[in-house]
Image: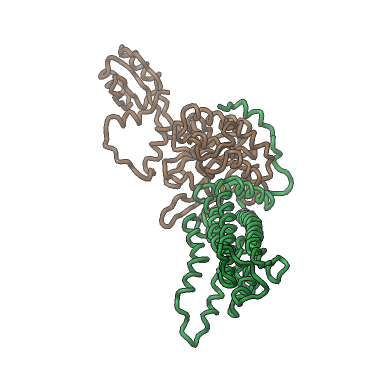
Amino acid sequence: MASVAAHEKLVGGVVAHHPPGRAGFGGAVRSEFTKIRSVRSTYWTLIALFIIVVGFGILFSWGQTMRLASISHGFTPGGQPVPPHNFLTAQEAQIRSHAASVSLFGLLIGQLIITVLGALTITAEYSTGMIRTSLATMPRRGTLFAAKAAVFGFVALVTGLVTSFVAFFIGQAILSSWHVNTTLGHPGVLRAVIGGGLFIAVCGLLSFGIGAMLRHSAGAIGASIGVLFVVWILSNFLPGPPSGWFGQADIDKWIPLDAGSRIWLSQQIGIHQFSPWIGFAVFCAYAAAAIIGGLILFLRRDA
Amino acid sequence: MIEARGLTKRYGDTVAVDNLSFAVEPGRITGFLGPNGAGKTTTMRMILGLDRPTSGTVTINGKRLSQLAWPMREVGALIDAKAVHGGRSAYNHLLCLAQTNNLPARRVGEVLGLVGLSEVAKKRTKGFSLGMGQRLGIAAALLGDPAILMFDEPVNGLDPEGILWIRNLMKALAAEGRTVFVSSHLMSEMENTADTLIVIGRGKLIAQSTVAEFIAANSQQSVRVVTPDISALTALVTAAGATVRDDRDGKLVVLGLTPAQVGDLAFEHRIRLHELAPAHASLEQAFMELTASSVEFHAGLPASPDTDALTAGRVG
């Protein structure tokens, strides 16, 4: 039991009351970094992201070596794939040009995991009631919001980049057993691998913005997965617009996931798609819209 | 100094806070009193900028909270013991708050020691009892060593030891010259701690005065008498213009006469008195009389003799 006497020792300004300046972005960033590193859900989701993306990368890469084996040479009587020689079938050429993307394909699942962390970064403040304490200590809401988004975006980007590079190198190690030696020096490969990290960060920020708007964990995660994944799946099953309008692909390329994925696909698929950086810019615009919407509501609503 | 001017908050058709104006002065404990649903928490949330007033303003040292250079160094608030992320340790919870205002990390250890939570500093707050949660909230409020402290229902759910601790802490803080603004629906608690009162009901200001003035102005003094000759004394004081309530257990409560007057009357008429005491009206009684019309939900209890005992006040 603490005594009042213990308090009296503190009297007389242990803390200098008015140092120059004012509470601002720097302190808010340090605070948000403490917040994100001090809860377990951060570690769970980031580790899950890494394992899923790298794991699926390994799986897809291994799957492609099996395909290469079956198309080019088949197997020896002992069941061992026969090493290839110096000719390529059309399918082999395609696999080789897509080698980087093959090892990064786990990003399609990884995006679902980062949306969870992105949403929780803001919605957990509401579900726990922490937002009241946060705003009473840092009442400049725009600063708090920006710090939160910046810290989460940074953590997501670093994790995304590490994951993307590891998935690429392990994937290529597997594919190299078939002499598909794709390196970061090949055209578009470095962009694709860095793009994997960028893609993860922007997926998370999109979800963060939706979380700020909805203020509810399950709702925000559901809505983010809806925007990213469900829209993409629907677009592949629904009939296109009536002929004479514009092409199906002209609509498809605006689908968030289609646009955002350009950046980590090492080769252009189809002439109707955006180029990698334009597609990524479109994807960033969707995320920016969600974040601006979230910010406006964050500034206006009662907490 | 906290100043509210014409503070109003509406939720649709419901008026939670209605044109409230008051000032909270430094160096004393100001009790913010009202029945449940009177608008105390909404008012405190507006002071902290969590809710935006429909109209009117509330300022801290002349500014809105968001305009203060170092908010935590000027105002510390305990709004709700549950306003923490349960997955975070007590230390990290306080550290992330301290960092927003560039407070040194060692300050976290100091306030944890101050509220008696040093041993559980590394534990996640999910497992904290209500009392520990209140202490953590108070630690957060004290982090910036602020001159203004606000506590919303700080003794809610605490054991007697915890209540005494908070009461002494608030007194010590006020004695240091700080502004202490504490809300409660427990009148007895305010009577023991507060120096001045702001009383609200249904979002409206009912009274702002010192505790003593409030009781004097809003309740009748009464005298409690024990006598073997109840009927004779009743007739006597009634004839002298007082009103009498029978306290059932052989005691009379006399309203409208001083203890000296009652004693003299009895002496003149040779009526034996076994006990004669002034019954100081409690804050509770004054409060009940004052807010009787403004309680949001009446419980609709059937009238019984017990209600007399309630309104007769406690012997001081």
Residue drawn 60% across the image and 58% down it: A54
Along the horizontal axis of the image, is B243 left or right of A201? left
Q: Nearer the viewer, residue A220 or B105?
A: A220
Residue that extends furthest to the bottom in the rendered view of this protein = A244
Q: Nearer the viewer, residue B243 or A103?
A: A103
Rendering quarter of residue B89: top right
Does residue A98 appear in this view? yes
The image position of residue B262, as x and y in percent, is: 36, 19
Residue B229 sits above or below residue B312 on the image: above
The image position of residue B241, as x and y in percent, is: 32, 26
Along the horizontal axis of the image, is A173 left or right of A52? right
Residue that extends furthest to the front in the rendered view of this protein = A77
The image position of residue B158, as x and y in percent, is: 47, 32
Residue A57 sits above or below residue B242 on the image: below
Quadrant occupied by the N terminus of chain B: top right
Picture colour for chain B: brown
Does residue A289 appear in this view? no
Q: Nearer the viewer, residue B279 or A32?
A: A32
Q: State how many labels appear.
A: 0
The image position of residue B219, as x and y in percent, is: 41, 32
Q: Which chain is green?
A: A
Residue A8 sits above or below residue A171 on the image: above
Rendering quarter of residue A167: bottom right
Quadrant occupied by the C terminus of chain B: top left
Rendering quarter of residue A237: bottom left
Residue that extends furthest to the left in the rendered view of this protein = B231
**How is the structure coloured here?**
by chain
